[in-house]
Image: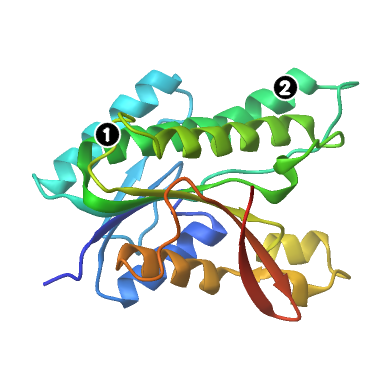
Amino acid sequence: MSAGRVVVYGGKGALGSACVEHFKAKNFWVGSIDLSENEHADVSVVVPRDASWEDQESSVIGKVAESLAGNKLDAVICVAGGWAGGNAKKDLAKNADLMWRQSVWSSTISAALAAQHLKDGGLLALTGAKPALEGTPSMIGYGMAKAAVHQLTRSLAGENSGLPQDALVVSILPVTLDTPMNRKWMPKADFSSWTPLTEVAQLFNKWTRDEDRPKSGSLLQLITKNGVTELIAAE
């Protein structure tokens, strides 16, 4: 018998794969949602890449509902996203559109999924970004999209948001995650200030198990110094 059921949106990316592996090791049934299959998940929902926002939502929710067969989820964890730089001078619409699709589409679909299939008291975790708490002139599209995720988080935590009773919704706001791609592109950086993926997965596991839960609607900055990570709630 499984310890519970979780779905990871972005389950094939670096952080998503770490979450899938962590929850599987803890004996959870794990579903992955992404543009490509995660063979380690119990169920892998592949998002139709070229479909509209609305069609992606209906496809994902339909496939997850079929795989759950009436069971409820303990957690919906959205770690999908990406990064693009750029200011207003070149390709602003192009970069902003890409960031919107990667961060906002996935987060809203996760919210709709949670509204229908999360159990009472379950967890909905989204992924914002610490830089988006302020202006991001060198990465405007990215900042816009992540700020929208922050707003979505706070809206979902309010009354009549559509989420199940006593659900916890939070956003993690990393600075830099310790991923292979980040190490490739920033080989001379101070890795001791990067947040390990396993620590993030452990956080999600604790909150899923109703341990050390923050206030619903929290935007939690992940600040890592000398290999030690602190959670600092944004005002």
Residue 63 spot, x, y in % from top left: 23, 37
Asked if residue 208 is positioned above or below residue 137 in the image, the reply reads below
> Dot 1 corresponds to which residue?
61
Which quarter of the figure has residue 222?
bottom right
Residue 228 spot, x, y in % from top left: 67, 79
Does residue 47 show up? no
Name the N-terminal-most of marks 1 and 2: 1
Left or right of 48: which side holds 26? left
Q: Mark number for residue 185?
A: none
Q: Nearer the viewer, residue 74 or 80?
A: 74
Q: How many marks?
A: 2
* Residue type of the residue flagged with mark 2: Lys
Q: Nearer the viewer, residue 119 or 197?
A: 119
Asked if residue 51 is positioned above or below residue 85 in the image, the reply reads above
Left or right of 141: which side holds 34? left
Residue 30 spot, x, y in % from top left: 29, 60
Residue drawn at (71%, 60%), measured in percent from left and top? 176
> Dot 2 corresponds to which residue?
94
Q: Nearer the viewer, residue 220 or 111?
A: 220
Question: What is the distance, in whole Å, between disc 1 and disc 2 at their CAs?
Answer: 28 Å
Which quarter of the figure has residue 181?
bottom right
